Image: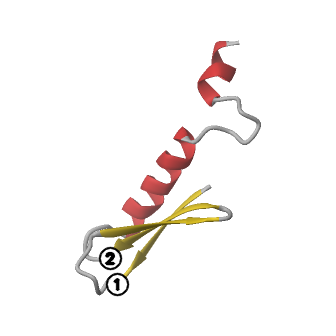
Amino acid sequence: MIRVTRTQLDTGAIAVVRATPDGLTIDMDRSHITPTGAAGLEQALNGLAPRSDGNDADEERQS
């Protein structure tokens, strides 16, 4: 699962990505993304991620 959070980054970076046991966490500087934008990005990225059983959503739609 991919999680997008808004935070205050003190590094001057727009975003920082970290791998966790549960997936990826993307920390975005709050001055660069709205709460709605973060939620939309998270939903879109999770929609692209392959399922844990190895079947992509596109393959499922074609059957």
**Quadrant holding the C terminus:** top right
Q: Quadrant of residue 23?
A: bottom right
Q: Residue furthest top?
A: 63
Residue that numbered label 1 is attached to = 8
In the shown orientation, is residue 8 left or right of residue 60? left
Q: Residues within 10 Å of mark 2 (few under 14, many from 20)?
A: some
What count of labels does the image hold? 2
User: In the image, what residue occupies the spot 43% across and 54% down?
Assistant: 41
x and y percentages locating residue 61 in the rendered image: 65, 20
User: In the image, what residue occupies the spot 64% across and 13% down?
Assistant: 62
x and y percentages locating residue 40 in the rendered image: 44, 54
User: In the image, what residue occupies the spot 53% across and 39% down?
Assistant: 48
Q: Quadrant of residue 56?
A: top right
| Label placed on residue 22 | none
x and y percentages locating residue 8 in the rendered image: 34, 84
State how far apart marks 2 and 1 are (Cα): 6 Å
Q: Amino acid at mark 2?
A: Arg
Q: Are marks 2 and 1 in contact (CB under 8 Å)?
A: yes
In the shown orientation, is residue 25 left or right of residue 33? right
User: In the image, what residue occupies the spot 27% across and 82% down?
Assistant: 11
Q: Residues within 10 Å of mark 1 (few under 14, many from 20)?
A: some
Residue 6 drawn above or below residue 1: below
SS at circle 2: loop
| Label placed on residue 30 | 2
SS at circle 1: loop
